[in-house]
Image (tube, rainbow, N blue to C red):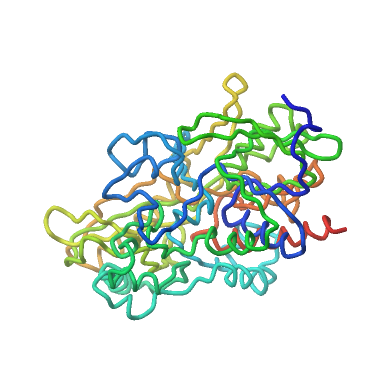
Amino acid sequence: MRSAAAAEPVKILIIGSGYAGSVAALRLAQVGLDSVVLERGKRWPITAQGGTFATPAAPDGRASWLNSWSPFVNQQLDVYPGVLESFRANGVIALAGAGVGGGSLVNNAVMLKPSQAAFNRAFGTHINFDEMSERWYARARSLIGPTPMPDDIYASSHYTAARSFTAETKAAGLAPFRADMAVDWQTVRMEQAGTREASLIIARSIWGANSGAKRSVDRTILAAAEATGRVSVETLTRAVDVVPSAGRYLVRCERIDDTGAVVARPEYNAEHVFFAAGSMGTSRLLVAARDRGSLPALRAAVGKGWGTNSDRQTVRGGMPWNNPTQGGPSGIVAQDTDNPYEPVTMINFPWPIPPADGTGALGALAMTTCSADGYFTYDAATDNVSLTWPSTSPSALRATQAVTATVNRINAANPGTSTLRLNADTASHTLGGVALGRACATDGRLYGYNNLYVIDSSLIPGTMATVPPALTVTALADRCVEQALKRILR
């Protein structure tokens, strides 16, 4: 093992290149500070020829992070550093993006701000909602550039399912609307015209959009940061430990090849470290570092308060034919605020497999509130971190009841339709593990250590109260980095 003196010296190290890491890199560069960004995955450049990402029609190792298995395919895949990790936890399969751009590569690109009541439920008094709403959410929108689906695309044959979902939820007394989305709609028009590879218009978005229609952060926020010349992104490089060293931090890493084999063990001697590897990545890294004894002063709260938006995948059938490709991510949102159990948000998403009876089908990701009862544990014998999610807890069961009630309400308002699928096994929005105000200060500084900052989705205590968290993660990271800059520059 090399000594700290032999490690590469850097002033600022950022672990993760998703929403949070990209914001940090950009804000630091804008004030003249250099940074190194570590990304465990690959860079996925969009080309004019298309074909960057795997597709549901021809899945391969690009769809899965170093695993021959994926919950979205029925076949064995080649092992490859693909874009989507499916982590088998006790009680749930937790999803996490991998690659330059992180979760922005694989999410449905919906950008929603939570209500004040929902925000306060998640953060309590630790962060002022008015401050976030008036400043940080606005800044996040300007960075990401989301817009709702334009009228011409909504009216097109590729988005019949979006109109069907709107009509059926409206019939159920809900108030559907088109959400802001991190989508380049002009590129979607080019898909429709046949001048870009068909991607979003034929439901090919879960593993990336080959047309380039997604405004993923590798092509927006991080691209702006790299254009300053002050940001270096190291791909296929994962941090495995962090150790204090003479007032700085020795960050030990593994560099892998396309098979996942370790080919080098670089080390960085950093003055400041920003953890931006997402709820799964940051939580696992810090729990291991604490329990190995590398960062023993980390609080017991690190690794606790994990949860999801109580994601439930739903599919309904029996409605009129609404085309098999179902363009997406459609971004039609319907919220059931008077649900007898908990508020529910339904976001229409592509479901490319029509029922055998020739009727139409609609997919939706349903989200509701649930207690953040998940926790990470470290096994010294295997040097691995596991995650437990109590899927049969009263709170989790209540979440399923809430979603079931909303789906039943929609079915009842649309005779002939029925529920084909309601699945709670997979968590698309993983949150918490290093909860703000419990494991770290309100600016993301880890209790017990100077110059270690958490700025990603692990700060959010287990639920973002029925909306996708991407916009909040971006806004929260921006806020934390600005406060950290005051300390760094001082």
Q: Residue at x 11, y 55 (%)?
A: 357
Write down the quadrant of residue 478 in the picture: bottom right
Farthest residue, direction top: 381
Q: Residue at x 19, y 65 (%)?
A: 319
- Image coordinates of residue 362 in percent, x first then y, are 27, 61
Question: In the image, residue 185 lies at what x, y percent?
Answer: 40, 73
Residue 243 image point, x, y percent:
75, 33
Where is the C terminus found, in terms of image quarters? bottom right
* For residue 184, above or below residue 40: below
Depth check: give the residue in front, 412 or 140. Answer: 140
Q: Is residue 416 left or right of residue 264?
A: left
Residue in the foreground of this view, choosing between 236 and 351: 236
Q: How many marks?
A: 0
Q: Residue furthest left?
A: 357
Q: Is residue 318 left or right of residue 444?
A: left
Q: Quadrant of residue 383?
A: top right
Which residue is at the front of the view, 294 or 165?
Answer: 294
Residue 225 is situated, as x and y percent measured from the top left of the image, at: 64, 61
| Closer to us: 234 or 92 | 234
Locate the N terminus and report the quarter of the image it occupies: top right
Q: Residue furthest bottom?
A: 151
Q: Please report the residue visible at 71 percent of the width from the left and 47 percent of the height from the top.
A: 13
